Image (tube, coloured by chain):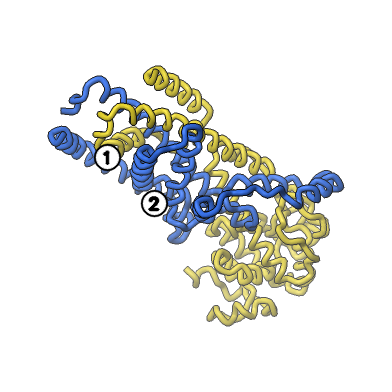
Chain colours: A blue, B yellow
Amino acid sequence: MASNQSNCDVSSQQEPNQLRKKRRKSTQTTESHLQNDGTGEAKNQPTVRWRTCTARRIYSSKLLEALRRSRRTTSPRGEKTREVRETADRVLAVAARGKTRWSRAILAKRARLLRVKKVKKPKVGCDRMLQESEKRKKLPAVERKVKVLSRLVPGCRKVSFLNLLEEASDYIAALEMQVKVMTTLSEILAVAGGGAGVGGGSSS
Amino acid sequence: MDPPLINENSFSAANPSSFSLTEIWPFPPSSSTALGLRVANLADRDGSLDESNVTEQSGGNRNGNRKGIDLSSEEDGSSKTVSTTTSAHDLNDLSGKRRKISGSRNENSESRAEIEASSAANNKPAQPSSKPSEPPMQDYIHVRARRGQATDSHSLAERARRDKISERMKMLQDLVPGCNKVIGKALALDEIINYIQSLHCQVEFLSMKLEAVNSRMSMSPAIERLHPKDPFDATGMIFGPQPTKDYVQGPQSEWLHMQVGGSFKRAM
């Protein structure tokens, strides 16, 4: 095992050096390009924040750890997918470092679930909403879509339109990164699983 | 950057709404377009400041989006139309240096003294500016109900708010592929909603896939040896050459389906 790991280190050290240089160039170009738009706000832009390789690395490492941990703990048979998805969302929220509303909402959801069992109360205002929508056949189309959007982005139901747009852009960038990382992770783990099954000492 | 923008000629009588500005700016109290230019750059920080100068310009620099607001402000500033004509020329020169936010306002910089009549013609977006401000401008979202826009400060604040909204919409449109071609808030929001829903679906799908991989991995203990660093370097290799934007699109989902099919075969 030790020899395998040392070999991994050697081979992995050469590649990342070259790769990191290439990655640095790409990230620098994107950041410099964005700096022209805003005064010193380049790093806060969602595109920059979620597209850096560092962000991906952080997210993938945390996701791996979380998955390993969840694998070890006994998991309910029927709801594994939901668990994985919630883990992934939680890790994504953690990667956001609490700066965005949706990330705090995701983490708060889980904290609430752990404390108290979720009881879904029937919406009291639902009937009223239906009546109103019948009276006013067309709420301004944009408002309807804003409501739908606010439901899609976690934790943004009563947020002003302006902040909703900002949260949505950050959320979209984060989701894109999540999809990328999860795809590659599943690929790698699948390959690694297959490879390790066939030949344990292939890396040596 | 300030001195060349501000010309002595473009100064005009002070507007009561710009008094706060004079406290801040060392230059003589004025409603110069250049000042408005400069302050327009501060729009992000303080919308009210920006708007106080914008009304001073009161040229045909408004977009049709402003509609009745232009009229009300123009009526207020009708006494200053003479001064604004001179300032309009400065606008022409300075329009190139504007930022996006103020640039959209100053596109139609051929302002005449009779702004009310020509504003409709000058405004490039074909929205009639002669409408009163009442119709709830269906393109815009109001979180609060709109009152009559008699006072300038309200309309100024609304203008600043609208600009912020349009800026954020543009940012969103850049993020969502295919949203650039769509014009209008409603359709763009449609695209955004569809995109978020598709991303959610992808995440669900990938979590199913990961769960399958996980369960397979937990069965064979040999995989536990996976070095923590490997996935990162491998991810770096895979992430590096790929273009970031084109990733999440229609054909990719088919590719994912193929991958899943492959992994399922291996699992079984």
Q: Quadrant of the N terminus of chain A?
A: top left
Q: Chain of mark 1?
A: B
Disc 2 to disc 1, how far (Cα)?
A: 32 Å
Residue at the image point whose x is 70% and y is 50% from the top: B124
In the image, A37 versus B208, the foreground residue is: B208
Q: What residue is pinned by disc 2? A: A32
Count of marks, rendered view: 2
Amino acid type, mark 2:
Ser
Q: Which of the pair A79/B231 is nearer the observer?
A: A79
Task: Examine the rendering and report whether any part of residue B190 can be seen.
Answer: yes
Q: Are the residues flagged by discs 2 and 1 from a single subunit?
A: no
Tell me the residue at 50%/31% (across/down): B205
Quadrant for residue A183, please give it: top left
Depicted B151 relative to depicted B94: above or below: below
| Residue depicted at 56% across the width and 72% down the height | B7
Q: Position of residue B31 (x, y in %)?
A: 64, 74
Regarding mark 1 in the picture, which secondary structure is present there? loop
Q: Position of residue A37 (x, y in %)?
A: 48, 54
Q: Position of residue B262 (x, y in %)?
A: 41, 19
The residue under label 1 is B228
- Subunit that carries the residue with mark 2: A
Can you say whether A176 is above or below A193 in the image? below
**Quarter of the figure with the C terminus of chain A:** top left
Quick one: B187 or B65, which is closer to the camera?
A: B187
Which of the 4 image quarters holds residue A40? bottom left
Hey, what amino acid is under mark 1? Pro
